[in-house]
Structure formats: C-alpha cells, structure tokens
Image (cartoon, rainbow, N blue to C red):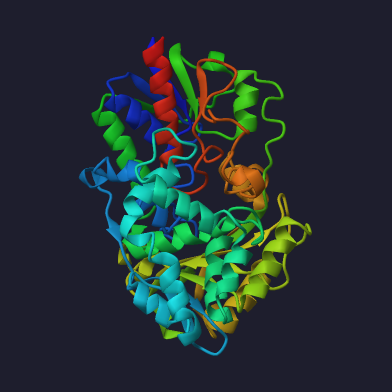
Amino acid sequence: MLDAVVVGAGPNGLTAAVELARRGLSVAVFEARDTVGGGARTEELTLPGFRHDPCSAAHPLGINSPAFRDMSLDRYGLEWLHAELPMAHPFPDGSAAVLSRSVAETAASFGPHDAGTYRRLVAPFLPKWDALARDFMALPLTTLPRDPLTLARFGLAGLPPSTWLMRRFRDDRARALFSGLVAHAIAPLGGLGTGAVGLVFALAGHARGWPVARGGSQSISDALTAYLEDLGGAVHTNYEIKRLDDLPPARAYIFDTSPTALARIAGLGSYYERFRYGASVFKLDYALDGPVPWTAKEARSAGTVQVGPGSRDIAAALRAASREGRAPDKPFLITVQPSVMDPSRAPAGKHVFWAYGHVPSGWDGDLTDAVERQLERFAPGFRDRILARATAGPPELAARNANYVGGDIACGAVSGLQLLLRPKLSLSPYTTPHPAVFICSSASPPGPGVHGMSGHNAAKAVWRRIRAS
C-alpha cells in the first residue's frame, strides 16, 4: 500500500507529492493528460519553433513561493529569467507607469502627487516580505505566524476593497496600475480583500521581480517531477480517474482537481455545492515577426504589460465579465512577452506574445478583434507583426484543463469570503468528510497562481493525519 496518491500533476499536486516524499513517504501521482503541468505547460500552439505557455507565463508568485524556494529546483533545470522591468502600464499619450524592482523608480512613474503615497504604502512590508509571504500564503494558518504584527498590519491595509485603498492616490496613473494588479484575480475591484491582491503582486515584484522560466512554464513542472522521481516518487500520465477504486490502495488521496470533480470521484455528494466558479478569459497566443511595437518605451522592455487606459476602464471591463454577463467592448488586457527575456522561445528575430481579456464564464464568442483593436491603440502596427495566432475562449480552456470549469483559470471565484476561505468556510480547508481524501488545488488557500503553496499546505495536513493514525 502506498502512503499517498496524488490525482493531478499540476504545480500544486506535484508540490504536495514532493513534500510528502521528502518526509520519507511512498507517493505516486496520476495525471489524465499525456504530460505533467496543469496550468504550467509549454506547447507549440502556432508555428514550429514558437514555444507558448497555454496558461501562466510570468511568475511573481512562483519565484517568491516559500515552497519552491525551499526545494532548490535550479538543480533540476529551473532558471528564472528577468526583463529589465517586471511590468509596465502604458497610457494613450505614450507614457507609462511601471512596476520596477526599485520602489523609487515605481513611485516616480506615478507623478509627484502619488510618489510619496506609494512609498509609504509599501515601506512597512517590503523589508519583512519573506516572513509576510510565508505567513500570508499559509493562510488559513498551518503554522504560527512568523511575524504576526506585520501580518496584522498587512490585513488592515489589504482586507478592505482595493477601491478604498486607491483613494490614497490623487492621479489615475497610480490607480490604473494598481487596478491592473488587482485584475489578475479576475474579480471586481470593490470586493473584500482585493487591496491585498494588489499589494501582494506589487511587493512580489519589488522583492524578486516577475520572471519567466527559461524554456517555458513547463520547466517548473518538469523540475518538480524530476525532484519527485529523485525522491523515489512515481508519475503516471494518460491515467484518467473516474472513481477512487481506479486508484491503487493508499493511506491518503490528495486531489489537485476542482472541488466538483473531487466530490464526483470520491462520492462526496453535494459537499461542495456552494463553491462558486468565477468569470473566464479569452486568451490569444501570437507568433510575431518582431517585437510588439509599443509606443511607450517602458513597455518594450517589460516582461508583463497591462493594457487599459485608466482605472475606470479596468473596473468596467471586470464588471462586465463578472457581473453583467457580457464581454467588454474595450477589454482590459494582461499581456506577457516571454521572448523579450528568453530568446529560446522563438526562432531568431521572432517573438512569442500572449494576451487575455476577461469574459463571462462559459462565453462562446470571439474576442479577437476587440483584443487586437485595443493592442493597436498602444502598439500601432501590431497586426502587421502577426505570423500566426491561437485563440482559446472558455470552452477551449475548459477542454485543455478540467480544473477550469467554465473557463475559470482561477479554479474558483476569487471574490467575497471565497478569496481567503476556499473551498468551504472551514478551519481545515484541505480535508474532506472522507478521512483519507484531501484537496490541494488552486481551489484551496492561498488560491490561484503557480506557487505550489496549496499543495505545500495540503501536504502538511496529510502528514499530520498519517502521523496520528
């Protein structure tokens, strides 16, 4: 009998498996797809030689993850590559606000009225970032906080809606950039705890940047797999699980799946019936004949570029997708240009680029024209650079990854109490009514992103249960 079986070879499932194997347990992972990776894969989606990340590409949470940092994944080929700027937010006049590794450079890009405000906002947290990140990403508490005072101060700043926090800024340059940071959660800006989302992304950028993985996000998953196998664990692909009886006997079963899939496979009935899935995105992957011709020079040297004229435009786009059930006419775009820092992603002189805009769950329309019109506003001549494109709306995203129910790449709405208390209101979110069944996907705290912390935290719960039996 195995000690633990993990269902799903995404970053969280692989991290959970590694953490348990490091403790000397026998572990096997079963993945329905023919490759490991989940939301961290790399494929040739457009043309030969152009390596795209179908989901995540830039990894501010990955490089800052306490779990990944404890694993020395560089020994297994993971290398983080940085652009000159982690992120830029261009404006129609050709200027841009930036998220730089330097707080001073970031603050200066907002203008004189808001520079000091921004410095005062991040100053209490940045020197204590490592302890804060570990405490914040372990919520709900799996260990005692390392720095409870800083965590409490962060909660006071971040738990109110981001719209409250942004009242501190006088100009829209700072509000627009911060709104874009919050929009990575794919939820309205006025929700509880959204200030914390923006602060986490900003602090992560200042602390260690927003890098990509050399060769693609698949490198993260491959490094975790190689480490697991070195520890004696096994990974089985092309192995779809429909019920627990499809798995070998084990003392614990850990699911890197959506809550609804777990309930179906484990026979938990309506246990997760109140779990809410959120809005989706429409994603485009491009093969380009040259770099994106951004008007703002800062955007040309940034790894991630947020595309939205102002905070009101961003709020309207999120509101349309999340609450009004329609695709926005002028979508807010999150874009990543991996080949700016990793030339291996495309043939010499060519580039890969991706962009997504927010759309309602399950939306089956085509946002391509709206996305490209928005890109042309900030990068005139962009369409002339396109060699090929691959599009994926909610149905295609759900088909690629079963965890993306309705195309929800966050594996659950990141809004309301579900921002922190997911997948249920519980002090033990990784356990289920079945004493041997656990959940470790992005549906569990601390939520979406390629950071492995949901798997790390779930592994602790499994270890405690096995040790007590």
Q: Check the image and name the residue furthest to the bottom.
A: 93
Which quadrant of the view contains residue 262? top right
Callout count: 0
Q: Is residue 22 left or right of residue 304?
A: left
In depth, the one of 150 and 17 nearer the eye is 150
Q: Is residue 276 left or right of residue 444?
A: right
Q: Indicate the quadrant containing the N terminus: top left, top right, bottom left or bottom right.
A: top left
Q: Give residue 89's position: percent from left, percent from top.
A: 50, 76
Q: Is residue 440 left or right of residue 432?
A: left
Q: Residue at x 62, y 30 (%)?
A: 261
Q: Give residue 332's position: percent from left, percent from top.
A: 62, 69
385 above or below 426? below
In depth, the one of 323 and 368 nearer the eye is 323
In depth, the one of 320 and 35 nearer the eye is 320
192 above or below 237? below
Can residue 58 be seen from the camera position used here?
yes
Q: Check the image and name the residue furthest to the front.
A: 149
Can residue 87 be seen from the camera position used here?
no
Q: Residue at x 42, y 77 (%)?
A: 107
In depth, the one of 223 and 84 nearer the eye is 84
Q: Give residue 5's position: percent from left, percent from top.
A: 43, 21
Q: Give residue 396's position: percent from left, percent from top.
A: 63, 49
Q: Residue at x 35, y 67 (%)?
A: 347
Q: Indicate the quadrant containing the C terminus: top left, top right, bottom left or bottom right.
A: top left
Q: Residue at x 33, y 39 (%)?
A: 224
Q: Check the image and name the residue furthest to the left.
A: 75
